[in-house]
Image: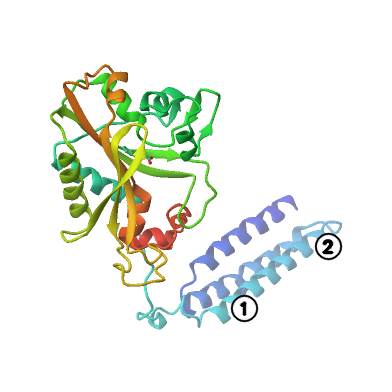
C-alpha cells in the first residue's frame, strides 16, 4: 500500500508540472487524456491496481485516489475557463498598452547643484576642501572671533553634543582648519552639511548644505570679493541677474555684507510673492573681509596678508533656482519629486 500511496504523490506532482506547461486548448486536451482517459488514463490505471491492496487498506487507498481525481478534474476545469484569457492567447495581447518603465538612478538635486557650484569655482582656480561635521567650540566660534558668551553666538542655533563639542552650525570652521594647514595664497571652497536647532518649515530645516569660500593673499580687497561673487552668481543663475550688497555683521569678517539677488520667482513684480514677500530681493549669502584677529588666530600676519570669505546656503539657493516652494521637499525622498531632476 505504501507503494501505491507514493505513486499517487509522484503522479500528483507530475500532473501539477503538466498544468504549468499548458499553453493552448490542444495541450490541455492532451493533459486531460493522459490522466482521465477512461481506458488508459493514469487514474484508471491506479484504480486497477486496487485489486492488489489488502481489504483493510482499501478504504484509505481508495480515498487518496479519489482526492487525486477530484484535484485533477478541478484543475482541468479551471484551465478550461482560463484558456480563453489573454495570457494563453498570444493573439489577444494588446500591443498598444504602455510598457513597463524602468527608471535610471539620478543624483539628488542638491548634490547636482553642489557639483555645479564646485565647477564654477574650480574654473576660477579654487581648491575644494573638507572639514568635520562634529566640531569643537574653538573652531566653530572661538577662532572665528566669537568671545565666550558673546550674544552673536545666539544667531547660530547650536546643537551641542558636550560642553565643548557641537554639530557645526556653519562651514566657516573650515576657514580656520585650512589656514592652520596651508600658507597663503589660499583660494578654497568647502561645500558641506551644517546643523542648526530649527523646527522644519518651508524655509528652515535642521540639516542643510552650505558652501564656504576663502581667499587669502597679498593685497586682497573688497573689490576682489565683489568681482568673484558677481562672476559666480552670474554663472550660477544667468548673466543679467541683479545683485545687491548690504552692510551686515559677522564676528569673523570686517567689513561684512549680506548679498541679495533679485527674486527669481516674481522679479519684484508681485506684492504677494511667497518667496521674496514682495520686496523683490532674496538674501542668499553672507560675506566680508577676513577680520585681522582671525588671521592672527592662525598665525597669518594681517599686516602682510588680507582676505575675503563668504558662506552661502546651497539648499536655499537651489530652491530659488528650481523654484521649489518648500525646502522640506528635498529631504522627503519622494521619488516623484527627485525624478524631475534626472
Ligand atoms: N558663516 C556665516 C553664516 O553661516 C556666513 C559667512 C561666511 C559670513 C563667511 C561671512 C563670511 O551665516
Choose between 162 and 81: the one closer to the eye: 162
Choose between 63 and 186: the one closer to the eye: 186
Residue at the far right in the pictured view: 56
Choose between 310 and 40: the one closer to the eye: 310
In which quadrant of the rendered image does the C terminus lie? bottom left
Q: Position of residue 334 (x, y in %)?
A: 46, 58
Quarter of the rendered image showing ligand 1: top left
Gap in angstroms between the C-alphas marked 1 and 2: 27 Å
Q: Position of residue 185 (x, y in %)?
A: 15, 26
Q: Which mark is residue 266?
A: none
Left or right, 189 with respect to 313, comes to left
Q: Secondary structure at mark 2?
A: helix
Query: Quadrant of residue 267 in the image?
Result: bottom left
What residue is disc 2 on? Answer: 59
Q: Earlier in the sequence, mark 1 or mark 2?
A: 2
The crowd level at tag 1 (other Cα within 10 Å; few <14, some 14-19, many 20+) is few
**Badge 1 residue CB within 8 Å of ligand 1:** no
Q: Secondary structure at mark 1?
A: helix
Left or right, 80 with respect to 234, comes to right
Camera-nearest label, 1 or 2: 1
Q: Position of residue 324 (x, y in %)?
A: 38, 62
Choose between 339 and 224: the one closer to the eye: 224
What residue is disc 1 on? Answer: 77
Image height check: is 171 above or below 109?
above
Name which residue lies at 64% across and 77% down: 38
In this orientation, does residue 1 appear?
Answer: yes
Name which residue lies at 35% across and 33% down: 172
Q: Position of residue 294 (x, y in %)?
A: 31, 25
Query: Quadrant of residue 134 in the image?
Result: top left
Left or right, 64 with respect to 155, comes to right
The crowd level at tag 2 (other Cα within 10 Å; few <14, some 14-19, many 20+) is few
Image height check: is 289 above or below 83?
above
Amino acid at each position: 500500500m505504501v507503494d501505491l500511496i507514493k505513486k499517487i504523490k509522484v503522479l500528483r506532482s507530475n500532473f501539477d508540472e503538466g498544468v504549468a506547461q499548458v499553453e493552448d486548448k490542444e495541450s490541455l486536451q492532451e493533459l486531460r487524456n493522459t490522466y482521465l482517459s477512461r481506458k488508459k488514463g493514469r487514474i484508471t490505471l491506479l484504480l486497477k491496481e486496487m485489486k492488489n491492496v489488502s481489504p483493510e487498506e482499501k478504504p484509505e487507498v481508495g480515498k487518496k485516489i479519489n482526492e487525486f481525481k477530484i484535484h485533477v478534474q478541478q484543475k482541468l476545469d479551471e484551465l478550461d475557463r482560463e484558456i480563453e484569457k489573454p495570457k494563453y492567447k498570444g493573439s489577444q495581447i494588446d500591443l498598444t498598452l504602455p510598457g513597463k518603465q524602468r527608471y535610471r538612478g539620478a543624483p539628488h538635486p542638491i548634490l547636482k547643484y553642489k557639483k555645479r557650484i564646485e565647477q564654477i569655482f574650480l574654473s576660477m582656480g579654487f581648491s575644494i576642501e573638507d572639514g568635520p561635521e562634529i566640531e569643537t567650540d574653538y573652531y566653530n566660534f572661538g577662532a572665528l572671533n566669537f568671545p565666550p558668551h558673546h550674544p552673536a553666538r545666539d544667531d547660530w542655533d547650536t546643537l551641542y553634543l558636550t560642553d565643548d563639542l557641537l554639530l557645526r552650525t556653519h562651514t566657516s570652521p573650515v576657514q580656520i582648519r585650512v589656514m592652520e594647514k596651508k600658507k597663503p595664497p589660499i583660494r578654497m571652497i568647502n561645500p558641506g552639511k551644517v546643523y542648526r536647532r530649527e523646527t522644519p518649515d518651508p524655509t528652515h530645516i535642521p540639516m542643510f548644505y552650505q558652501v564656504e569660500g576663502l581667499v587669502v593673499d597679498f593685497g586682497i580687497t573688497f573689490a576682489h570679493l565683489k568681482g568673484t561673487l558677481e562672476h559666480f552668481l552670474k554663472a550660477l543663475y544667468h548673466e543679467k541677474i541683479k545683485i545687491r550688497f548690504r552692510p551686515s555683521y559677522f564676528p569673523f569678517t570686517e567689513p561684512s555684507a549680506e548679498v541679495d539677488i533679485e527674486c527669481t520667482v516674481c522679479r519684484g513684480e508681485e506684492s504677494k510673492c511667497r518667496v521674496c514677500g514682495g520686496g523683490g530681493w532674496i538674501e542668499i549669502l553672507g560675506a566680508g573681509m577676513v577680520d585681522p584677529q582671525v588671521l592672527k588666530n592662525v598665525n597669518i600676519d594681517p599686516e602682510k596678508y588680507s582676505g575675503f570669505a563668504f558662506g552661502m546656503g546651497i539648499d536655499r539657493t537651489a530652491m530659488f533656482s528650481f523654484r521649489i516652494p518648500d525646502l522640506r521637499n528635498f529631504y522627503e525622498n519622494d521619488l516623484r519629486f527627485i525624478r524631475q531632476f534626472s
